[in-house]
Amino acid sequence: MMIGMTYFLKLTAFVAATAFVVEGQSETHTVTFQNLCSTGVPTLKTYNGEILSTGPAYTSNGSLIAAIAYLDVGCGAKGEGCTLIETTLVNPASPGTGSSTDINLIPPHSFSVPSGFWYYNGCDGHGANCTDADCPSAFHSSTEGGVGIVCLAENVNLAITFCN
Ligand SMILES: *[C@@H]1O[C@H](CO)[C@@H](O)[C@H](O)[C@H]1NC(C)=O
Ligand SMILES: *[C@@H]1O[C@H](CO)[C@@H](O)[C@H](O)[C@H]1NC(C)=O
């Protein structure tokens, strides 16, 4: 009888814990920085310029839409004059949607430091590096068109490196 009741309680606790975990599996995305330059402040902002991180890993609750990242070595408030990484991390709700990340050297942005990124927790290793002002992996003019590196995995994370 006692054993039966203990088992029942444990089972109930287990079911409750499982339900909590499943419910807690909402969308999240983490952006991490690795700065191998001997200078600068890794910076992650919303497109409107709100600071999300100046170095530590940033985890979004839900999607992260149109964020910008750069190594602040005296850049403008939106990364002007610097190598800019643009990213949207979002779980694909329908075909043709999902995460996309690119490197932007379109004026007023310009090459400052080697910058690169790759996805993890999905699309592992997919990304791009830009090591000089003529790097083919970056956008250089707004007439170029094209898209960034796309990832259709859910809850994908992004690693950004400088001077790698
Ligand atoms: C995440 O966002 C959801 C929906 O807005 C909210 O219910 C939840 O409390 C948030 N969680 C955290 C940890 O901020
Ligand atoms: C970017 O550079 C890193 C470090 O050298 C390398 O591991 C990675 O494979 C490169 N990514 C691409 C897409 O070339």
Image (cartoon, helix red, strand yellow):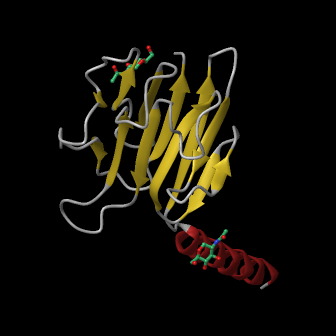
**In this orientation, which residue lies closer to the viewer: 60 or 15?**
60
Relative placement, left or right, of 144 versus 90 is left
Residue at (54, 60) in percent of width and height: 48
**In this orientation, which residue lies closer to the viewer: 134 or 37?**
134
Give the image location of residue 153, x and y in percent: 34, 51
Residue at (38, 34) in percent of width and height: 124
Relative vertical location of residue 8 with respect to residue 60 in this rendering, above or below: below
Relative vertical location of residue 49 with respect to residue 123 in this rendering, above or below: below
Give the image location of residue 143, x and y in percent: 18, 41
For the N terminus, the quadrant is: bottom right
Give the image location of residue 120, x and y in percent: 45, 38
**In this orientation, which residue lies closer to the viewer: 133 or 63?**
133
**In this orientation, which residue lies closer to the viewer: 12 or 135?**
135
Give the image location of residue 132, x and y in percent: 39, 14
Residue at (55, 23) in percent of width and height: 162
The quadrant where ligand 2 appears is top left
Residue at (36, 43) in percent of width and height: 101
